[in-house]
Amino acid sequence: MKVLKFGGTSVGSVDNMKSVMQIITDGERKVVVLSAMSGTTNTLVEISELLYKKKQKEATKLIDKLEAKYNKVISQLYASADYKQKGAKHVKQVFETLKSYTTGEFDENGEKAILAQGEMMSTGMFHFLLLENGFKSALIPALDFMKIDEELQPDLKYITEHIEPIMADVADADYVITQGYICLNADNNVDNLQRGGSDYTATLIGAAINSEIVEIWTDIDGFHNNDPRYVENTAKINQLSFEEAAELAFFGAKILHPSTILPCKKRNVPVRLKNTMNPTDDGTLITHDPQGKGIKAIAAKDNIAAIKIKSDRMLNAHGFLRKVFEIFENFKTPIDMITTSEVAVSCTIDKMDYLEDILVDLESLGEVSIDTDQTIICIVGHDLIEEKGHQYRIFKALEKLPIRMISYGGSNHNISILTCREDKKEALNALSKGLF
Ligand code: ASP
Ligand code: MG
């Protein structure tokens, strides 16, 4: 069985929802994961922000505006009065839920519940669309099986155990529809897999039910070999390994939520990226098989801070790095890149929530300096370290640009370079010219 996930744009209008119906209804049984209609989650975030600020009137206005938008979609999506009514009833329930948060105290649980409503609507509406068109559809609530633990990590064992009986219950449905993004947390409250998390839902389900493939349908035709927002004439990549795709997603390629690949990698379920607007294109296939050597793609990630800790105490001393890492760990801040010399260590972070506290604690270890507004440029491919010549071509391409850090040899399929954001566009273009 396949798992197909459609993003916000793919379900973002009446026409697009109907296109998705066309794509999925080929008679083959499948699971279909949907995002919220595009723009909805952003509006729900805005509503929550207003409610935190006790601007309940403004929040209500925004809710009403969103409701009008959905009512319009409902009036166009269905052909029959019966389904118009069913759709309207479903959406009305959701808006009643939203409105229930506009009085009284507002907290994180309220926010999480509000953020979940976009996917509740899109899936319900789509399920009714399938039914109206005579297809055997079943809607299974993601909250019945999707779960994260105390560390906010998906609990694949729980998910597997819980989705199995649910899938058996809906054995006679051809199309099993569920919500992306939303889940229960360790306290059994509604939560989510972070923005863009519907991809992650799909690969978690794919891994849990051991599906034949997970297809992520978006509005681009797959991974490109460079960032199309900054570089002209980028080319689509036909095939990547799980490792290569994970590095690209993590280091900036916006097409996938960074953790998406992991569950499928773990259970060896292939992932294919597909374009809803161009459904006959093969997109990008991601499997264990790297298919060819050499440099395949470049991605860039902004908003990076590089922190340098310099100390003579590092000379010939052991335990220094542990102390440095401990400070980042105490503030739950992951380190992305790291380079060391005998008397200094530089590391990069992209989570700035505790930056001030981290800097204060690091001062106790040595002289600390920070460069903000940096960009990691990540060059991804197969066997980059073992094959000769790649390093030369990379540095030749970047010969005119200042480089703040280089990470080489950490893995076989990634060379990362840190530069300031101002130089990003030039660096990406120079690399494209020099490498492809
Ligand atoms: N609707 C959520 C978001 O906009 C999840 C997703 O689309 O993947 O982030
Ligand atoms: Mg997305």
Image (cartoon, grey):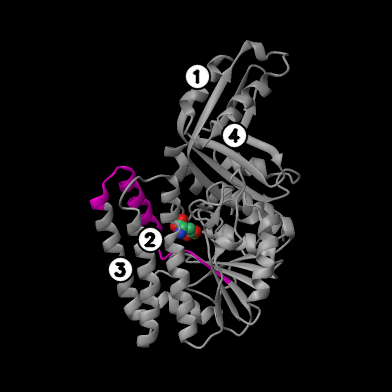
For marks 1 and 3, give the CA distance. 49 Å
Q: Which residue is mark 1?
A: 360
Please report whichever mark, 3 or 4, sits nearer to the chain's N-terminal start: 3
The answer to which image quadrant residue 330 occupies is top right
Q: 10 Å neighbourhood of mark 3: few (<14), some, or many (≥20)?
A: few
The residue at the point 42 percent across, 38 percent down is: 422
Q: CA distance from mark 1 to mark 4?
A: 17 Å
Query: Relative to residue 376, is residue 297 depicted above or below?
Result: below
- Judged by depth in the image, the label closer to the viewer, 1 or 2, is 2
Tell me the distance, in whole angstroms, between the alpha carbons under discs 1 and 2: 44 Å
| Element class at badge 1 | helix
Identify which amino acid the numbered label 3 is placed on: Lys
Disc 4 packing (10 Å; few <14; some 14–19; many ≥20): some
Gap in Å between the C-alphas at discs 3 and 2?
Answer: 17 Å
Counting residues from the start of the chain, the first of labels 1 and 3 encountered is 3
Q: Which mark is residue 69?
A: 3
